[in-house]
Amino acid sequence: MHLRRFVELRKEIKSFRPPQKRVFVFLIFFFVFFPLLVSKHDSYSLPTPQPPNLNEFLSNPFSPFLADKPINIMQGKVEPGNTFCSILSDYGFSSLTIAACIEAFKPVFNCRKLSPGDEYNIETDGKGSLLKITIKTNLVTIYNLRKEGEKLLPSKDKVFLSKKITKVFGVIEDSLFGAIVKAGEHDQVAIDFAEILAWDIDFRHDLQKGDQFAFIIEKYFKDDQLFCYGKIKAVEYNNQGKVHRAIYFKDPKGQEGYFTPEGISVRRSFLRAPLKFTRISSGFSYHRFHPILNQYKPHLGIDFAAPQGTPVLAVGDGVVVEKGWKNGNGNSLRVRHPLGYETMYNHLSGFGKTIRVGERVQQKEIIGYVGSTGLATGPHLDYRMEKNGRFVNPLQEKFPPGFPVDNAYRHLFAETSRKMIAQLEEKKDSFQKMVAAR
């Protein structure tokens, strides 16, 4: 028994560790192994201090620099096929924002009545949030939609202007643009002038040095400063002895347009060309050397050289029948028109936003953009026209004349035409008539 007790005491002595030794072992474990454990587990490590984020600071609504954030301004004219919804959608606004704007505008303006030629101005803050929309539907009426807090507040403004009707004339030196700017007018006037006679004169190729032009135009002034241009009332262009004239007329029913002095609309079924102010790089031919295929092939169209992305216009009203990639023609579009005509537009870089197969297009509507897709050495438009299934030269084709003035109003037109022609033929450099804008 004494022996068994002795063995038990020895075991207790061996298992005994003084407190100092336990502390020493703990300290070794802490300083040697704990740092290794911490380095393997990022969740135990303290975060590294980061420098302040300047963008977050500036975007904070309580930032003292918030007032200096830039205001983005987007402006333009309503094109054929555009709607209030499509314009705002193209600028990235959500359907909820667009619906809210339409509803807020209702007391002063019906957004469905937006028309081609109306001008718009859209303002957003640095984050893209809407601040203000301004729509000018005519020369003196402006509609505004302004955001104040969480509300959209509409308003309607009237601008009081004086109108001056002026005769402008000049001589072509090198271009219509240069001659009209030299006469003291803005280049937009040259574009408007060219569009009136676009069915009769190709201002890219028909112009000759020494040609003479004249037009009568409305100018609107605010506090004796030019505010904007109004209608061109009449135009005249003498192209190597051949005189072209067009008179603006609006009948009591609201139908308006430009007519010859005899009362026939200058608007034909087709434009002379689908581009504005470009040059022909290759004409219609049955035997042309292809620069890529290195062989002679028929080229049954007209190549218009133009910068990449230049808008391509529908030459006439019609329906889109083909759209997409077409081998060597690249991105191609085909439009079917009345009277057996079809037109093709090849090598496009892209298509108009509303262009789809089966959809109707209007004359002068943007249907695509100049590119170099397919077999092309550079940006240009390959424009082709078929008549009853046979390719024709669009620059030599004789198109049907426009519609005449309604018989019920021919006497009114005759009076307008007589006055405009008399003013065009006046020897005075200019004349003016001051009236109050209504």
Image: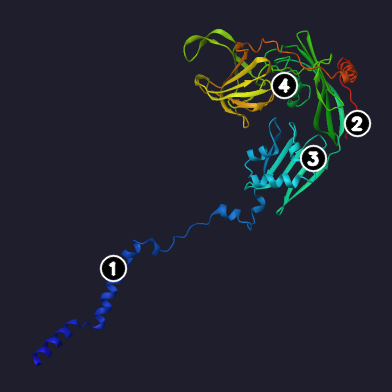
Number of callouts: 4
| Residue 358: x %, y % from top left | 62, 27
Q: Nearer the viewer, mark 3 or mark 1?
A: 3
Q: Nearer the viewer, mark 2 or mark 4?
A: 2
Q: Earlier in the sequence, mark 3 or mark 4?
A: 3
Residue underneath mark 2 = 435
Above or below residue 386? Residue 228 is: below
The quadrant where residue 389 appears = top right
Q: Earlier in the sequence, mark 3 or mark 1?
A: 1
The amino acid sitting under disc 1 is Val
Does residue 168 appear to the left or right of 174 in the view shown? right
Residue underneath mark 3 = 142
Label 3, secondary structure: give it.
Answer: strand
Q: CA distance from mark 1 to mark 4?
A: 86 Å
Q: CA distance from mark 3 to mark 4?
A: 30 Å
Q: CA distance from mark 2 to mark 3?
A: 20 Å
Residue underneath mark 1 = 32
Residue underneath mark 4 = 177
> Label 4 near label 1: C-beta < 8 Å?
no
The amino acid sitting under disc 3 is Ile
| Residue 146: x %, y % from top left | 74, 48
